[in-house]
Image (cartoon, rainbow, N blue to C red):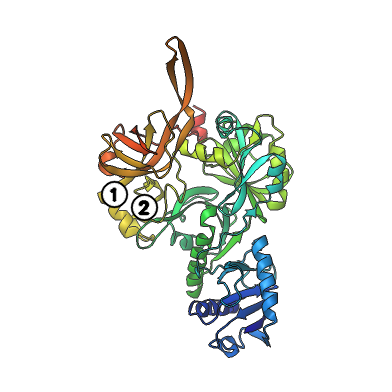
């Protein structure tokens, strides 16, 4: 049986949010099998059970017109769901629901995701909504950033990553060559897949502080800070993010693409709670179509940008942000930060201007596009964590060696999520910690490898990221046929992982299980390469 509900309007109002939430709860209780939002103004409920009656959800406050349809609506619902699953477009600041499959009319056991598009005007709740957790998110066709066609033109090798199609490398250039070009010159990375959020309202600082460990109230305008969302019970890292306190009265937040849905849900739930107390806070989630993000990284980054921007980059230190015109592209947010250990910036730009901006940057002869492969090896050398690999909800900031993200005032007030666990570890120390490893020449050490004692008797930890370093090389020589000597340079095998604290001292000898072999490894200081973040006073000396 199918019911159609005509909503008061396409955009969601606060009352419609409550109505939507009640539908989700009824869905969880098994009152019906599938919900879909059709034409972004109608809710269609399909049910094979008689438990769900039209009157169950018919509230005059929320429903303008109620139509009892017959089973012919099922075909329309099926066709709509199939079409949506194939395109997988996220439409504006959307309220997203996970849909369960039909029981009697199964669509190949697919799980459908549906969005409600939020209008940009005439809407009480233009910041959008996110409701989820009905089931595990379906693996659908990856989304594309605004630069997808540009990547293809540049011979980018496109691969799925965090729900998006992104270039892992370009043309015939190896990842190592792209890596070294970034270290020596300058590369441009498309990081538009990352979630960009703007948080407004007079209570925005206290609101975000209730979710993370940063001291935003004492942060200066146009300054940025690395922080983490932490679990309220375990103190584990739900995500790491960069927050910029703009001089325009809002917070600009950049968080991981792999945690997009979880972060949206976390912030929306918190926003609902704060609003119920009369607080003023609004979260606006920017889609990759609305706002792209380009990372310009390398020692030549400032030189390349100086000829394009209308601001003095010498007055823009590391973790500082400003609005600027880049070339002929206005209102770009430039933040001096990055994920490579090199000097550089991240530029937030309107999605329809992203390709033009990338073209302007590539006009310089020493600038190249770089992909996911180089980005990963660069961040590994810089000792930077990747969420889902080096940090996750089971890892606290103390264990991860990120205690610096816990601001002094927040430690004193002990009012951040998971503070009890984290402060206990700060005082007494954790039982495990993240370390850097330099392994013996041979096959690369990869994530998941077991870390053993030097004798190989006991397991003391595990590797979370690893591979050969393109910047750190070792020269080896060997003999062929008694008289021919061959000398070559190989990338040093490096890795990060977690070990028992008693094994974490720099210089400690350990071993790593690589396939069926045990190779020697030495604990070393992180990062593997000294960072080159720009600070005016230091760089002038």
Q: Secondary structure at mark 1?
A: loop
> CB atoms at circles 1 and 2 under 8 Å apart?
yes
The number of numbered badges drawn on the structure is 2
Vertical side of 42 occupied by 151: above or below: above
Which residue shows up at 69% across the image and 39% down it? Answer: 155
Q: Which mark is residue 396?
A: 2
Residue at 67% across, 83% down: 71
Q: Is residue 130 above or below residue 511?
A: below
Cα distance in 3D space between marks 1 and 2? 9 Å
Residue 403, image x, y percentages = 37, 47
Of 498 and 73, the residue lying toward us: 73
Label placed on residue 430: 1
**Residue 43's disc number:** none
Lateral position of residue 80 relative to residue 284, left or right: right
Q: Nearer the viewer, residue 516 or 462?
A: 516
Q: Is residue 34 above or below residue 220?
A: below
Nearer to us in this view, 111 or 368 = 111
Secondary structure of the residue carrying numbered label 2? loop
Q: Position of residue 201 (x, y in %)?
A: 55, 64
Considering only order in the chain, which callout, 2 or 1, is on the residue closer to the N terminus? 2
Which quadrant of the figure has residue 312? top right
Neighbourhood count class around disc 1 (C-alpha, 10 Å): few under 14, some 14–19, many 20 upward: some
Image quadrant assignment for residue 113? bottom right
The N terminus, quarter of image: bottom right
Q: Note whether residue 10 is visible.
A: no
Residue 198 position (above or below residue 60): above
User: Residue farthest to the top?
Assistant: 483
Q: Residue at x 27, y 50 (%)?
A: 427
What is the x, y in percent for residue 267? 50, 64
Q: Quadrant of residue 98?
A: bottom right
Q: Judge by depth and name the residue closer to the eye, 275 or 394.
A: 394
Q: Is residue 251 visible?
A: yes
């Amino acid at each position: 049986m199918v019911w159609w509900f005509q909503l008061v309007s396409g955009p969601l109002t606060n009352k419609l949010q409550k109505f939507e939430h009640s539908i989700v709860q009824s869905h969880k209780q098994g009152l019906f099998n599938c919900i879909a939002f059709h034409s972004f103004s109608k809710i269609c409920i399909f049910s094979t059970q008689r438990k769900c009656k039209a009157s169950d959800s018919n509230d005059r406050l929320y429903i303008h017109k109620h139509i009892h349809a017959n089973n012919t609506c099922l075909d329309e619902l099926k066709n709509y769901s199939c079409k949506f699953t194939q395109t997988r477009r996220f439409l504006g600041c959307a309220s997203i629901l996970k849909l369960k499959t039909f029981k009697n009319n199964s669509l190949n056991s697919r799980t459908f995701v549906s969005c409600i598009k939020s209008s940009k005007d005439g809407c009480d709740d233009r910041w959008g909504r996110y409701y989820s957790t009905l089931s595990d998110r379906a693996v659908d066709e990856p989304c594309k950033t605004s630069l997808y066609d540009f990547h293809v033109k540049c011979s980018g090798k496109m691969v799925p990553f965090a729900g998006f199609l992104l270039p892992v490398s370009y043309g015939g250039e190896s990842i190592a060559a792209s890596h070294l070009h970034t270290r020596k010159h300058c590369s441009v990375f498309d990081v538009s897949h990352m979630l960009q959020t703007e948080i407004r309202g007079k209570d925005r600082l206290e609101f975000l502080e209730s979710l993370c460990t940063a001291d935003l109230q004492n942060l200066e305008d146009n300054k940025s800070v690395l922080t983490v969302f932490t679990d309220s019970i375990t103190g584990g890292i739900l995500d790491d993010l960069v927050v910029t306190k703009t001089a325009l009265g809002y917070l600009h937040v950049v968080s991981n693409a792999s945690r997009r849905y979880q972060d949206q849900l976390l912030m929306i739930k918190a926003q609902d709670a704060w609003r119920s107390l009369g607080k003023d806070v609004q979260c606006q989630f920017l889609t990759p179509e609305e706002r792209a993000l380009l990372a310009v990284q390398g020692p030549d980054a400032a030189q390349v940008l100086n000829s394009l921007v209308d601001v003095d980059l010498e007055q823009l230190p590391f973790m500082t942000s400003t609005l600027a015109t880049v070339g002929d592209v206005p209102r770009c947010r430039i933040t001096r930060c990055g994920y490579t250990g090199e000097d550089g910036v991240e530029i937030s730009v309107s999605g329809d201007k992203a390709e033009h901006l990338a073209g302007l940057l590539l006009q310089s002869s020493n600038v190249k596009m770089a992909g996911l492969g180089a980005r990963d090896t660069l961040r590994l050398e810089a000792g930077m964590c990747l969420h889902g690999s080096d940090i996750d909800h089971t890892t606290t900031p103390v264990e991860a060696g990120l205690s610096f993200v816990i601001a002094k005032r927040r430690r004193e007030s002990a009012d951040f999520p998971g503070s009890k666990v984290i402060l206990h570890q700060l005082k007494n120390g954790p039982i495990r910690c993240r370390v850097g490893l330099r392994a013996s020449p041979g096959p690369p050490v990869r994530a998941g490898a077991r870390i053993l004692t030097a004798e190989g008797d006991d397991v003391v930890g595990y590797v979370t990221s690893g591979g050969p370093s393109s910047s750190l090389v070792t020269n080896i020589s060997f003999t062929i046929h008694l008289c021919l000597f061959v000398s070559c340079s190989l990338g040093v095998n490096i890795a990060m992982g977690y070990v028992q604290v008693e094994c974490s001292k720099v210089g400690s000898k350990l071993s790593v299980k690589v396939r069926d072999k045990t190779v020697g490894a030495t604990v070393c200081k992180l990062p593997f390469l000294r960072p080159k973040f720009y600070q005016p006073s230091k760089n002038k000396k």
